[in-house]
Image: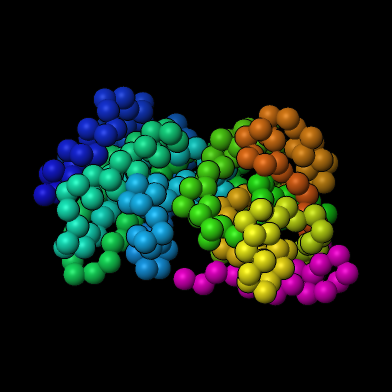
Amino acid sequence: MEQEIIRLFKASQGSESRDEVQIGIGDDGAILNVSQRETVWVTDTITEGVHFDLDDGTLQQVGRKALAVNLSDIAAMGARPVAALVTLVLPKSMTMGEIKKLAQGMCKMASAFDVAIVGGDTNRHDGPLVVGVAISGTVDVAKAWRLDGARAGDSLLVTGKLGGSILGRHLDFQPRTSLASYVASNYEVHAATDISDSLAVDLGHMVQCSGVSAVLLTDRVPISSDAEKLSMTSQRSALDHALFDGEDFELLLSMSADAASELVADQQARELSGGGIVVIGRVESGSKGAIVDQDGIAIAALGYEH
Ligand SMILES: [Mg+2]
């Protein structure tokens, strides 16, 4: 069956391949030539019943998401994706037709984001569907977007609109790789991360790692229409959803105030950002890891826990 699955990935990816891929899917290992630049690796696994439910999403969407969460991490490093390894742990009951749908979702996403699926592994078990992906990318290490580089005086920026991704966006979000490539080549970014757990958690993590604190201007946080919609039934405000919901997969950047103003006004960056880039706060020294709002009230690092 594994051979059949390999053929499936081979066929769905067509004959076009990336320059870096010397030997792709089907051999005991893949061979890439990435000697010109530093290589970055990310990996993320999604599990049925934890990160998705097949009642809410299709298998194509699950395959898409497995790639997308990893591409989001590549973007958050300021890197360009190159190649992916895929590990499938399949329920024994899953048919070849179903596996094909999963593979289609992955291959479509891979080709849209110009990443080659170069290999992987498959297992069967009496349990839920588990899809693990590892993606390599290239980056200039001196310019890579680290988590620990935020400096006092920096502006904090966020892409897109936040909150309420559970209404569907968590399955079909756009990883911000194109924006990241553009910003990485044209601006100096001191620190970055993607918002996977929540704005509060991921910002908390960034300022903690950087040994600084943050003032979050809650009236500037871009709120998605999903957050507004959820707030009508959830007994929580739309802002609360934007601050504390998980799986937005937008980028959070820390850069000098001057660079931030330039980026906010950059038309090309705005077009690549899917809904804009806005300043939502600033970095301050002291109180390592703390986040307060514009009135000095502490914001707890609450978010999505798997
Ligand atoms: Mg991340």
Residue 90: where, in percent of width, then height?
22, 59
Q: Is residue 175 left or right of residue 184?
A: left
Q: Write down the quadrant of residue 28 in the picture.
A: top left
> From this viewpoint, which residue is outermost toward the right?
295
Q: Residue at x 20, y 39 (%)?
A: 8
Q: Is residue 58 left or right of residue 158?
A: left
Residue 119: where, in percent of width, then height?
25, 44
Q: Residue at x 75, y 32 (%)?
A: 266
Q: Is residue 298 left or right of residue 68?
A: right
Please say if 183 is above or below 125: above
Q: Is residue 84 left or right of residue 195?
A: left
Q: Is residue 35 visible?
A: no
Residue 7: where, in percent of width, then height?
17, 38
Magenta residue span: 284-306
Residue 184: where, in percent of width, then height?
62, 37
Residue 296 belongs to magenta span: yes
